[in-house]
Structure formats: C-alpha cells, structure tokens
Amino acid sequence: MLVIPPVSSLISPVINLKSITRNKHKRSAASRFGKDQSRLATAIVYCEANFGALDGKTANGLIRRSEKYEILSVIDSEKAGLDTGMVLDEKPNSIPICRDLADSLAQAGSVPDAFIFGMAPSSGMLSKHERALVLEAMSHGMNIVNGLHEFLNDDPVFAAACVANKVTINDVRKPRDKKNLRLFSGRISEVTCPRIAVLGTDCAIGKRTTANILTRALNDRGIKAVMIGTGQTGLIQGARYGVAIDAIPSQFCAGELEATIVEAFENENPDVIIIEGQGSLSHPAFSSTSFILRGSCPDGVVLQHAPRRTQRCDFEQMAMPTPVAEINLIQTISDTKVIGLTINHEDMSDNEVSTAITQYEHELGIPSTDALTRPPEHLVEMVTAAFPELQRKLIAVA
C-alpha cells in the first residue's frame, strides 16, 4: 500500500481552511489582460529566492502576461511584501509577493485553482523541500502546474496525492507518445506568410518577452500575428500553439515545430508568424535554437542581446558572444536574415540603452530597440521594413 508522506509543518503554519474556501476570484484582472477574466483559473506562483532573477523566468513571464491564469500572488520570502510589478518593471500591478504558502492563501481569501512552480532551474528537478511544498498545495485542493523536466504524474507519491485530494498535475513539458511524434516533412514551404524567429545571444535573456510584445504590437496595428511558443513558460502563459522543444527527442524536434507552425497557419490564416526562441545558437549547452531554425525555416530573425552581460548565464567561465558573431553564425547555418536587434536592459540606465541602440544600429546596419522600455511601434517598424508587403495591413493607432 502506497503511503503519502506527511508534509512538514515547518513549510508554513497551519491554515484555517474554514475561512478559506474554494471559489473563483473576481479581482479586477481584466484591466491587466483586457479580456473577460471570469474564465481564467486563479493561481499562486512559487518562486522562492528567484523572483525577478534569471531562474525565476517562468514567474516573471506570468506576471508580465498570462492568458490562462489570474495570478493572485508570488511566493518569495526574500522579497515578501513587495509588489511584483515594481520588482520587474518599476510599475505597480497590485500582485503581492508573499513569504510562504500560508501567507499567499491568507491574502487570497480562498483556495486558488492552481499552484504553479514558477522557476526554471538548470537541474529541471524538484528539491526535497519543494516536493513537500507541492504536496502541501495539493492537500489544500490546488491543481499543480509543473514546467520542469521531472514529470510528477509518473511519480507514485504524486499520483496518489492526485487521487486523494481530487486534483490534477499538468506536466507541461511532457511530450506526446513517441508513436505520435512527427518528423520533418517539408510542409513548412506551404506556410506562405513571413515567419520571424526571436533568437538570442544567451539563455534567459528576454526572447519570449520580446516575442510576446512583438506579437501584441503587430495585432494592435492590424497585422494578424500568431505566436508559436517553444518553452514551458509560453505554454503556461496560454500560448494556443506551441511545443516544449527541449523535452522532445531530437529526431522529432524539427518535425514537431514544423507541424505546429503549419497547424497555426491553416487554422488562423495569419499575416505573420512569430516563433519564440530558446537558448542561443552559439551556446554549447543548448541545441534548441538549431532545431528552431530547422523546423521553422524563418524568413527573418530578431536577435535579443544584453549589452551589460559579460558571461553566459550559469556559465561564468564562458564569455558572451557579440551580436556580430551571433548574427554571422545564424546567417551561415540558416537561409535567413537578421532583421533587427532588441536589447535586454539589465544593469543599464535609460541613457545607456539609448546609446546602445544608436551604436548597434550604426554597427550592424539594422534597426534596434528595447521592447520593454521603448514604444512597441519600433518593433512594428522593424518588421514592416523587412517585409514591406505587411505595410498595407497597418491601421492607425488612436
């Protein structure tokens, strides 16, 4: 008989569930997402000691954009009491950072629908403490959203906890059965609209954020754009089309991405397709970018770069490449063209960002901008300059 281990009371104090009921929150998240929030599931995001940092990119991304969940709070005891929007972008959004699960539940006033593991550690595995915390969240009736390489549904302890607590676990990265995986077929040639991949000079550098902002900016200007997610965060955010490419056997990576892009093209009839990048083509630790280039066969690439980052993320012994080096590599191994450079402004003042934009435009001969601090119109102009046929779709902004 399988026994579910007790959860230590050291994780968080005992919570009075009589005062915390399971119901749907009706907070004014509509102002954040611009749509009917009654259909969104509510969620707490766990990001201990990492919110706003590189390994907290899933939590960071969910705070900036979520079409699937209404985020009620983030757990990070080191930043407890702060506003998540202020931490990320110096703009308040009324989503608090809480010290632990008990604090999050008390502030929520009811048990949220989901507990999202909001970190992306390089190990891709839960620690012993984190396993206990996830089990505690399940004991309160929360479904689990897990973006790690460790598939909790395959763990007998978590499987038993699902049954005992009548909850579910969404292992976001778990691919379909191998018999259903698709090989590259060449059907990408049937996608006649421009395909633009947002790649980068390092991992955790802002590729997904830029891709999201670019997609939204194009749609706002009348150019129908569809984004293809390629990682766990994009899928958790609610990407309609996507695949966690780093969890797929290499033989099928290009084919799965190609098939997803073809499906989006046939279903949506978009004017342009934006493909989220992963890792970096020049980074020896990651192979996802090469599969993205092969599976999407992009007509253009937007390159994301952090001018102040001197070493690779998690690899301090490895120097960052220059944009020139990365562009040359991309255009050497793929029949595509880098159409613009976007800047990650970490550790930079606004004046330094402006100087960098001017410098890179002069050095590279392509448009440059910062997706987060400069008008989104700059991204639209970057795309329409490379693909003039899209200009006729533009509508004036009120």
Image (cartoon, helix red, strand yellow):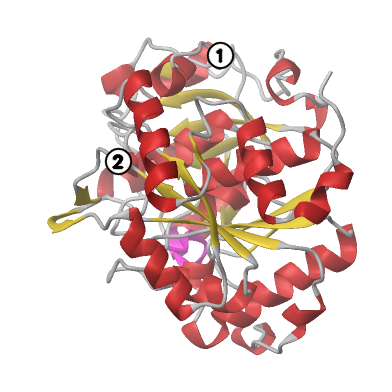
| Residue 243 as seen in the image, left or right of residue 201 | right
Q: What label sits on residue 93 in the rendered view?
A: 1
Q: Which mark is residue 188?
A: none
Instruction: Say left or right for 147 vs 133.
Output: right
Mark 2 Cα shell of 10 Å, populated few (<14), some (14-19), many (≥20): some
Question: Which amino acid type corresponds to the residue marked 1 in the rendered image?
Answer: Asn
Compared to 388, does 336 lie above or below?
below
Position of residue 257 measured from the top left corner of the image (x, y, whole percent)? 64, 72
Residue 209 percent across, percent down from the top left: 53, 41
Q: Nearer the viewer, mark 1 or mark 2?
A: 2
What residue did someone put label 2 on?
A: 307
User: Magenta residues: mostly which secondary structure?
Assistant: helix
Secondary structure of the residue carrying tag 2 is: loop
Image quadrant of residue 55?
top left
The 10 Å Cα crowd at callout 1, few under 14, some 14 to 19, many 20 or more, is some
The reply to whether residue 128 is in sight is yes
Q: Does the magenta stretch include residue 74?
A: no
Q: Quadrant of residue 262?
A: bottom right
Which portion, as a residue range, is magenta? 150-157
> Which part of the image, by quadrant, shows the C terminus?
top right
Q: Where is residue 41 in the image (x, y as percent from the top left)?
A: 70, 34
Relative placement, left or right, of 131 versus 334 is: left
Point out the residue furthest to the left here.
317
- Label 1 SS: loop
Per the model, the C-alpha gap separating discs 1 and 2 is 28 Å
Question: Which is more toward the observer, 329 or 178?
Answer: 329
Q: Residue at x 84, y 56 (%)?
A: 270
Disc 2 marks which amino acid? Pro
Q: Residue at the spot x=77%, y=53% of the render?
A: 388
Front one among 128 and 300:
300
